[in-house]
Structures are given as structure tokens and as C-alpha cells.
Amino acid sequence: MDIIDHIAEDNPDAAQSLMDEIEAKVSKLPDHPKLYKPSTRVKGMRELVVTSNYIVLYREEPHSVEIVNFIHARRQWPPLKGA
């Protein structure tokens, strides 16, 4: 959670608030894996928008949900090949 650590350097309360929001939304995924929209970035994944700036990318597995990445919305993901 490098993003949380980075935010905490300047604003620990904001970092904790973001972490709490991530945990609250992610905790719903095991019971409702289709709650969030399919990703337009990566086939087979879904995007949980935590805030307008942060997205959790995840995929449904047969008996679980796998969190793949947590990114800033402006970040190029997946990375361009050769970049």
C-alpha cells in the first residue's frame, strides 16, 4: 500500500480515511463479486472505484476474489508495453 504510505507522510488522517473506505468497499466483494463494473482496461477484471482518484482492480476466481492492483485513476494501467 505504497499509496497509503505516501499520503500518510503529509496527512495521516486522510490516509486512514482512504484505507477505511477501501476496506469497507472491498469487504463486500466476497458476497457480491459482480457489484462493480467490468474493467475497460483489462479483460476479465472489474474496477471498484474507491474515490474519484483511486481504483481497486480485481478479478473473480471460482471460490474467491483476487485483488490485483490499487491504482491512482490517472495512472496508465496496465503499463504500456516497452515502457
Image (spheres, rainbow, N blue to C red):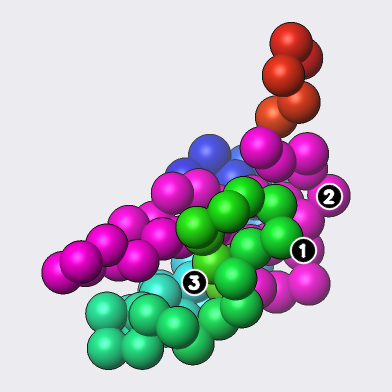
The reply to whether discs 2 and 3 touch (Cβ–Cβ < 8 Å) is no
- Which residue position is annotated with label 3? 22
- Give the CA distance from mark 1 to mark 3: 12 Å
In terms of secondary structure, where does tag 1 sit? Answer: loop
Labels in figure, total: 3
Residue 71 image point, x, y percent: 64, 50
Which callout, 2 or 3, points to the residue nearer the camera?
2
Q: Amino acid at mark 3?
A: Ile
In terms of secondary structure, where does tag 3 sit? Answer: helix
- Give the CA distance from mark 2 to mark 1: 7 Å
Q: Quadrant of residue 56?
A: bottom right
Q: Residues within 10 Å of mark 1 (few under 14, many from 20)?
A: few
Q: Main secondary structure of the magenta part?
A: strand
The reply to whether discs 1 and 3 touch (Cβ–Cβ < 8 Å) is no
Q: Magenta span covers which residues?
A: 49-78
Q: Is residue 57 above or below residue 2?
A: below
- Which residue position is annotated with label 2? 74
Identify the mark nearer the N-term, 2 or 3.
3
Q: Between 68 and 42, which is closer to the camera in this rendering?
A: 42
Q: Is residue 25 above or below residue 70?
A: below
Left or right, 73 with respect to 68, comes to right
- Which residue position is annotated with label 1? 53
Q: Amino acid at mark 1?
A: Asn
- Give the CA distance from mark 2 to mark 3: 18 Å
Q: Amino acid at mark 2?
A: Arg
Placement of the C terminus among the 4 image quadrants: top right
Q: Is residue 71 visible?
A: yes
Residue 68 image point, x, y percent: 44, 49
- Which residue is found at the position 27% from the left and 79% from the top? 30
- Which residue is found at the position 83% from the left and 49% from the top? 74
